[in-house]
Structures are given as structure tokens and as C-alpha cells.
Image (spheres, rainbow, N blue to C red):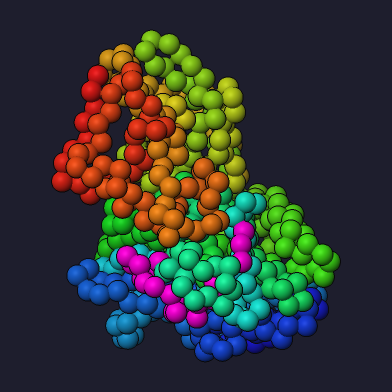
Amino acid sequence: VVIDNGIVEVTLSKPKGFVTGVKYKGINNVLDIQDSEDNRGYWDVVWYKPGRVDIFDRMEGTNYTVIMADENQVEVSFTRRWDVSIDSNIVPLNIDKRFIMRRGSSGFYAYAILERLEGWPDVNMDQIRIVFKLQTNKFNYMAISDKKQRIMPTLEDRARGQPLAYPEAVLLTHPSNPQLTGEVDDKYEYSMEHKESKLYGWISDDKSVGFWMIRPSDEFCNGGPIKQDLTSHAGPIVLSMFTSTHYGGKDINTQYRKEEQWKKVFGPVFIYLNSNRANGAYKTLWKDAKRQMSIEVESWPYDFPQSKDFPHSNNRATVEGQLIIHDEGVSKLASSAHVGLAAPGDAGSWQFESKGYQFWTRANKKGFFSIKNVRAGIYNLYAWVPGFIGNYMYKWRISIKQGSKIILGVLKYIPPRNGPTLWEIGIPNRSATEFFIPDPKPTLENKLFINKPHDKFRQYGLWDRYSNLFPSNDLIYHVGKGNYTQDWFFAHVPSLKIWQNFF
């Protein structure tokens, strides 16, 4: 199947629905033509039955349908229906993979509708994502934020390198680019929080072409807005991680049991391509990709996907209110509080939730919040406030109807405490960047994170630095004398002893 709008040409395998080719600006295929057609652009799920080993399923379609095709838009669908007679290595899901191309658009959209019916087998689904693998001899510059951009090693560079503590981490010993010699490459170093990872991708020096993943919303991602997950990494590879157990392990709920009926739309995400032959192409292409990201975010929720399972803006709701804090007998404004709607649960349960949708916003300085574009459903309202410990949860479940507006009024959060605060180490802000983060070993650095305090923790091997700093005794801290920015290690590491705090 070939879809072409005169700017970008996309080739899809029929009926499997793999993206086998993307033609743009004189490059016949920006995807890795050395790889097999089912390993260039694809959706996948990692799943298993309880007690069994993981199974990697690329969600191959078995049926192809043109959903719509006119002078302004084409949308195609690749589906697979599940029943008990299907191969046991096939995930028990009904799958509908959709691709959209629009007139005048320098890219294409991708989304998927996944469904399981009641009575289907017990499974865990630890990962759902979409993947693109680019040409290795063209794309060598990766950009995931304004300050995190660099020339990257190749897979061959990694293969010639020295393996480190886990397979993803490699010390580059004989890279094709000598400037990378002695650096560590580890895909987890390039993880980002969901709320910060709306744009990332790669740039090719050949014809100065950029290939970008734009995710305008994270409503369909698991774990909430501050969950970290993968973005792009050596390959060159571009991902959009929708659900995973990264950084949370089995505490993240990815279990689906026989009595559960479930359906969820992942995406759409926008795969954007751009080009610029002028000097300073890296900077120019990144700036243009940011401009396009802003357009996509402002356009969310899109009004053009044809699936009835993706509600447009007129079928979405708004929830508003004001959050105040009542602490130590004093009322305070919940300035910059994170406020969100997620599946019903306990206070803080949104951090481990994978099955439903989540909608988050930031309150203003006076604690007023407005959560927009909410899908119809049953939710709890959750919040946390920088500078205050604990998790807030509104005591009543909220039933959202299409097109409604709910005004909750003034909500009061009482942070947990057993008495007045006597002392405090650090800042309760769900970050450890204020604590002491050691320098990595000089032989195990990633130069990208040097002089970047907020990302210093991403350096490889910092857990080993603890034993260097405390070779015989564990950490000892004296309240009133110690300085947590210098004396309190940023992470708890395996230790035979215990940390001591004197006050």
C-alpha cells in the first residue's frame, strides 16, 4: 500500500501493516533498508501468560481496509481479530492499526485501537509501543530536547565496545567517530518524563533531513506525567512508548484477567519530516520541529481520525476547581499543584495505572486548575503539590459525560503529619536533583550530561560511587550541621548497613 501526498510517500505492507518505506526529499527510504521489512516501522507488545516467559508480538495485521480516501485525507486500517483457535504466541487482543496522511502535511499519523473481551485468557502486557529504525549511514545526530542533542554512535560502534553492567550500557572503545571514544552509551540515559517528551528524533547530514516523533498528548501513556520512559537511542531508533514497566517494575499494573473487558486508543502520534540545506541545519531543523510540535499540541484532540473510539473536542469535557492546602492550622494556596484525573483507586495509585486514560494540568499560583479535553468515563481526581508531602485524592468519584463542564469548587488538601515540622531534608517535589549527585568515574562519562545539573543523575554507574564515598560506613547526616546538597546521597543503593540521621 502506497500513500503519497506529494511531500511524503509512505509504503505499508498489506495486510500486515508494517511501515516498510518512507520517501522524502530525494531519499528513497529513510528507514533501514538493510533490515527486513517487518523490522523497520512497526507496533509491538511484550506480553505473557502468568508464570510464562515473555512473548514479543509485532501485531501483524490480517485484514486491510481503506477507511476513507478523498482529496484531503487518506486513512487506512490493518486489523487482526483474536479467538481461541489462534496461535498461542499471538497476544489475545483485537488489533486495529491506523495510518493517516493529510494534504499538505509533511508526515503521517499513526494510532491503534486495542481491545480484549471478557473471558479471554489471563495475560500481562508489560510494553506497548511504536518503533521506527532509520538508515544507519544517514542519521547520526539525535535531539530529544533543547539541551540534549548530540552525534550518536552506531550499532557497530556499540558491538565493538566494552559491555558494562547490563546489555544496554556499553563503553565505546573503537567508535567510527574518534570523538566518542571513552564515552558510555546507554539508551536509558535518554529517557524523559512523559510530560516533557512531546518531541524527539534524528537528523541526517545527507540532504539535511529530520525525522521526528511528535506525541501531542500523553493521555494514553501509563504511570502519569512524571513517569520516565525511552525516547530515541542508538540504532538510529525512534520510539513512542505508550505503556511499559520501565522505572516501576512489576508494581506497575499491567495485568489483565479473564473477567476484564478492555479497550484503549493509543495515539495518534505524528511522524514529522523536515529539511533545510542552510548552514546550522541541526539548530534550524530542531527549531522547525518544535514549531510543528506546538501546532500539533494546539490541535489536540484531533478532529480528523475516523475511529468512533477517538472522541473529538466537542465530545470531551472540562473539570475545574481550586485546590488549597490546610497545613499546621494555616490555609495556603496550592501554587503550581499537579492536578489530574485517572482511573479510580487510592491516593497515588495513578503512578501504577496502565489501563485507563490520564489527564493532567498545573494549577496557577492561586491553586485554580482547569483539566481540558477529558474523555467520558469514571475518574478520581488526584493531586500533589511541590513543597508538601503526600498525595491528594478527591473523596468522590467523578462521572464525566461527553461535552460536559464540571466545576468542583474549592478543594482542601491536608498533608499527612503527626505534629509540627522539626526539620526537613530536601524538598518534597518528586525529584532528587537537590541532593548530592556525584560525578561519574572519568572513564565512564556521557559528555552530554556534563554541566547539566538536572540530568546529572542519568550518568552511568553512579550507584558504584556510593561505595567509593562511603567505603567503611554508611551515610551519616547531622541535622542542623549537614548540607543535604553535599552530604545526602541522591539515591538509596544496596547496602549492608543503614543510613544514620542525628538530630
Q: Quadrant of the N terminus?
A: bottom right
**Magenta-span inclusion, residue 359:** no
**In the depicted structure, whether residue 438 falls above or below residue 91:** above
Q: Residue at left 16%, top 41%?
A: 497
**In the depicted structure, whether residue 118 falls above or below residue 408:** below
**Residue reaching furthest to the top:** 329
Camera-side residue of 425 and 226: 425
Left or right position of 272 against 97 = right
Q: Which residues are magenta?
A: 149-169
Q: Residue at left 56%, top 35%?
A: 362
Q: Position of residue 438 (x, y in %)?
A: 40, 44
Q: Quadrant of residue 435?
A: top left
Q: Is residue 313 visible?
A: yes
Left or right position of 12 against 337 = right
Q: Position of residue 464 (x, y in %)?
A: 31, 52
Left or right position of 84 against 128 = left
Q: Is residue 105 visible?
A: no
Q: Residue at left 36%, top 56%?
A: 461
